[in-house]
Image (tube, rainbow, N blue to C red):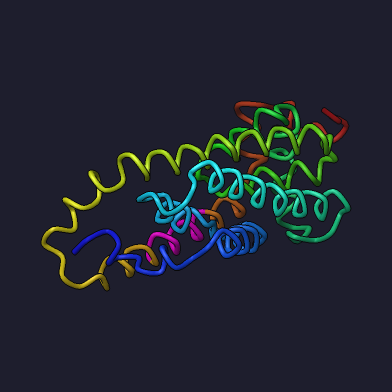
């Protein structure tokens, strides 16, 4: 089986479709539904301009995350009050490292809304958030594009040599997505007061506005 057989839709998808999938996928808070897979498959071969792919991916993801940030900034209930109370120490922690935390979340394939929503709730500077997030998304998008374009086939196709049916691969992707969602749920349920109270006791101070 070849890589193009695993994701046959990729050559048929255009820049607009990538933008829409990436935007709406990034707009769902906490659930890892990014357009990473589509971006990676479109980067294989020479049908699409690599820079256009990376730029579109970075911009659409950033716009979606900016919306989530502003909804949180306005105090809308993306998370319930009980969960937010548990997360307030974490909220203070990410605000202190605001731009760095936003950049790290954007530049890595972690569920970044775990950082963005607390930053919004903590009223972090919107301009700094936008710049840090956009920069991080550019780093992540270009990394995915170049790795997929130059190394994708050499890394993946040897693993597909003896595979005739793609179903197990698709099931594996679904399982991975479910595992990531489970991780997010567990992180939201952690007692951050107890955890950060040991390592960063200042985050427990209700009067701390940092």
| Image vertical order of residue 199 relative to residue 80, above or below | above
Q: Quadrant of residue 90?
A: top right
Residue 160: image location, x then y, percent: 18, 58
Residue range corresponding to the magenta coloring: 175-183
Q: Using residue 194 as the reference point, say whether residue 11 is left or right of it.
A: left
Work out whether residue 119 or residue 141 is closer to the camera in this orientation and state it: 141
- Give the main secondary structure, helix, strand or loop, of the magenta stretch: helix
User: Measuring 70% from the left and 55% from the top, which residue is drawn there?
Assistant: 83
Queried whether the magenta region covers residue 137, the answer comes back as: no
Work out whether residue 152 or residue 197 is closer to the camera in this orientation and state it: 152
Q: Using residue 202 as the reference point, say whether residue 136 is left or right of it.
A: left
User: Measuring 37% from the left and 63% from the top, which residue is drawn there?
Assistant: 173
Residue 54: image location, x then y, percent: 54, 44
Residue 183: image location, x then y, percent: 49, 54
User: Measuring 57% from the left and 65% from the top, which residue is drawn there?
Assistant: 17
For the image, the number of numbered tags is 0
Quadrant in which the C terminus is drawn: top right
| Image vertical order of residue 59 relative to residue 11, above or below | above
Queried whether the magenta region covers residue 177, the answer comes back as: yes
Quadrant in which the N terminus is drawn: bottom left
Residue 197: image location, x then y, percent: 65, 32
| Image vertical order of residue 1 relative to residue 95, above or below | below
- Furthest residue to the left? 162
Work out whether residue 81 or residue 141 is closer to the camera in this orientation and state it: 141
| Image vertical order of residue 50 relative to residue 176, above or below | above
Q: Quadrant of residue 10?
A: bottom left
User: Measuring 80% from the left and 52% from the top, which residue is drawn there?
Assistant: 72
């Amino acid at each position: 089986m070849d890589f193009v057989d695993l994701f046959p839709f990729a050559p048929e998808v255009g820049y607009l479709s990538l933008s829409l999938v990436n935007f709406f996928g990034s707009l769902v808070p906490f659930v890892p539904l990014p357009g990473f897979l589509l971006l990676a498959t479109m980067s294989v071969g020479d049908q699409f301009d690599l820079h256009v792919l990376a730029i579109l991916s970075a911009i659409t993801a950033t716009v979606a995350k900016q919306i989530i940030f502003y909804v949180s900034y306005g105090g809308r209930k993306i998370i319930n009050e009980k969960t937010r109370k548990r997360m307030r120490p974490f909220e203070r922690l990410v605000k202190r490292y605001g731009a760095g935390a936003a950049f790290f979340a954007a530049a890595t394939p972690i569920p970044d809304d775990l950082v963005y929503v607390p930053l919004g709730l903590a009223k972090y500077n919107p301009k700094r958030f936008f710049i840090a997030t956009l920069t991080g998304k550019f780093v992540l998008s270009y990394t995915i594009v170049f790795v997929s374009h130059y190394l994708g086939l050499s890394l993946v196709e040897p693993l597909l040599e003896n595979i005739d049916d793609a179903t197990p691969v698709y099931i594996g992707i679904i399982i991975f997505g479910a595992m990531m969602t489970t991780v997010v749920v567990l992180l939201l349920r952690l007692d951050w007061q107890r955890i950060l109270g040991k390592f960063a006791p200042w985050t427990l101070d209700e009067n701390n506005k940092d």
